[in-house]
Image: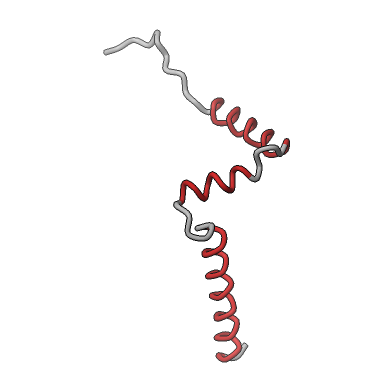
Amino acid sequence: MTTREFAERLSAVERALARLTSDGANTRGLHPLAALERIHATFEHDDAFREAMRLGRKWRRSDRRVPNSKAKRK
């Protein structure tokens, strides 16, 4: 690959990245929490999304360590 070809490909990647970050991450200038709410609302009635959230909660809860209340203190 020549230097010119590399520069053209890099420019294309930079343009694509700029487009993705401006469209997706910020959701057109909304406050980040408002953008999150807007994205979340698109999945509100999606059964697969609900199941994914349920499984995520189950996994996180299973990873919690329960303190041993009977452990001897020094």
**Above or below for 74 versus 47:** above
Examine the image and state in which quarter residue 72 appears: top left
Q: Position of residue 62 (x, y in %)?
A: 56, 25
Q: Position of residue 70 (x, y in %)?
A: 40, 8
Q: In the current view of this chain or complex, which residue is farthest to the left?
A: 74
Horizontally, residue 44 falls left or right of residue 24, namely: right
Q: Position of residue 22 (x, y in %)?
A: 52, 65
Q: Nearer the viewer, residue 52 or 44?
A: 44
Q: In the current view of this chain or complex, which residue is farthest to the right?
A: 47
Q: How many marks are shown on the rendered structure?
A: 0
**Colour option used:** secondary structure
Name which residue lies at 56% across and 63% down. Answer: 23
Q: Nearer the viewer, residue 16 or 36?
A: 36
Horizontally, residue 29 falls left or right of residue 6, namely: left
Image quadrant in which the C terminus is located: top left
Examine the image and state in which quarter residue 69 appears: top left
Q: Position of residue 64 (x, y in %)?
A: 49, 26
Image quadrant in which the N terminus is located: bottom right
Horizontally, residue 47 falls left or right of residue 22, namely: right
Name which residue lies at 47% across and 46% down. Answer: 33
**Above or below for 12 versus 38:** below
Examine the image and state in which quarter residue 44 appears: top right
**Above or below for 4 versus 56:** below
Name which residue lies at 69% across and 33% down. Answer: 51
Name which residue lies at 58% across and 85% down. Answer: 6
**Above or below for 19 versus 67:** below
Q: In the current view of this chain or complex, which residue is farthest to the top?
A: 70
